[in-house]
């Protein structure tokens, strides 16, 4: 069984530790946990990982956040992975910092990277893991907030929540989405 795990973010050192790059941070943590490495390939940094008899193709698109759909579609087709075995990992301002929500489908909730994936795939019916980054910003400053660095307090919270996100991904590929949602959502 093969899965595509797409951690969303922006390439470049200026974005490395920003809230919007939590998908990249979680992808790195997953690769580190499973002793894998990323290599730059077409449209993404890619790591092929093994976990309990499954192959996880983990990508960090190099297309920048707002064009993530191009990379996701390419790697789904290249690896011949069905949509129900795609997991998009992304930030969500509607959730408190560190909150995790696994969903089977849904809209883009104003997230440009997710909107592009939905557009390129022609469907919104695919799993996604949302990682809460909170919304502690004044009106009109959303872009500055999501592209801003994590605060010291957020960083302290980040490490155990990123580890929990890796657990969720490993559960998703072994137990399936329904059991994983029951185990981890609202916890």
Image: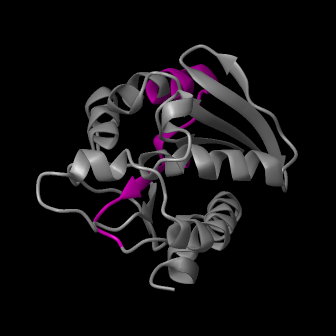
Horizontal and vertical percent position of residue 185: 47, 78
Q: Residue at coordinates 45% horizontally, 54% vertically from top-left?
A: 127
Outermost residue toward the front? 152
Q: Nearer the viewer, residue 142 or 117?
A: 142
At a point 48% along the width and 24% down the height, the residue shown is 71
The outermost residue toward the right is 35
Quadrant of the rendered image containing residue 132 = bottom left
**Residue 175 quadrant:** bottom right
| Magenta stretch holds residue 90 | yes
* 44 relative to 149, above or below: above
Instruction: Specify whether 133 is left or right of 80.
Output: left
Where is residue 118 drawn, in percent x and y? 29, 38
- Quarter of the N terminus within the rendering: top right
Q: Residue at x 64, y 46 (%)?
A: 27
Q: Is residue 150 depicted above or below 67 in this figure? A: below
Q: Nearer the viewer, residue 144 or 135?
A: 144
> Residue 73 vs residue 183: left or right?
left
Counting labels gives 0
Residue sticking out furthest to the bottom: 187
Q: Is residue 87 visible?
A: no
Q: Which residues are magenta?
A: 72-95
* Residue at the top extreme, as displayed: 42
The residue at 32%/30% (across/down) is 66
Closer to the camera, 180 or 6?
A: 6
Q: Tell me if residue 3 comes above or below residue 44 in the rendering.
A: below
Residue 88 is left or right of residue 49, and the answer is left
Nearest the viewer among 69 and 105 is 69
User: Where does residue 56 sit, x and y in percent of width and height?
Assistant: 71, 42
Q: Is residue 46 magenta?
A: no
Q: Is residue 178 visible?
A: yes
In the image, residue 163 above or below residue 150: below
Q: Position of residue 9 (x, y in %)?
A: 47, 39
């Amino acid at each position: 069984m093969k899965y595509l795990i797409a951690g969303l973010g922006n390439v470049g050192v200026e974005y490395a530790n920003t809230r919007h790059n939590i998908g990249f941070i979680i992808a790195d943590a997953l690769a580190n946990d499973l002793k894998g490495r990323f290599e730059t390939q077409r449209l993404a940094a890619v790591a092929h990982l093994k976990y309990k008899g499954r192959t996880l193709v983990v990508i960090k698109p190099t297309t920048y956040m707002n064009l993530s759909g191009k990379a996701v579609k390419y790697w789904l087709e290249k690896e011949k992975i069905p949509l129900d075995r795609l997991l998009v990992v992304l930030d969500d301002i509607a959730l408190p910092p560190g909150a995790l929500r696994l969903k089977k489908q849904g809209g883009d909730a104003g997230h440009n990277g997710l909107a592009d994936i939905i557009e390129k795939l022609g469907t919104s019916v695919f799993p996604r893991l949302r990682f809460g980054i909170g919304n502690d910003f004044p009106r009109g400053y959303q872009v500055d907030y999501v592209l801003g660095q994590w605060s010291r307090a957020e960083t302290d919270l980040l490490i155990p929540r990123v580890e929990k996100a890796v657990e969720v991904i490993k559960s998703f590929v072994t137990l399936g989405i329904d059991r994983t949602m029951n185990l981890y959502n609202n916890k």
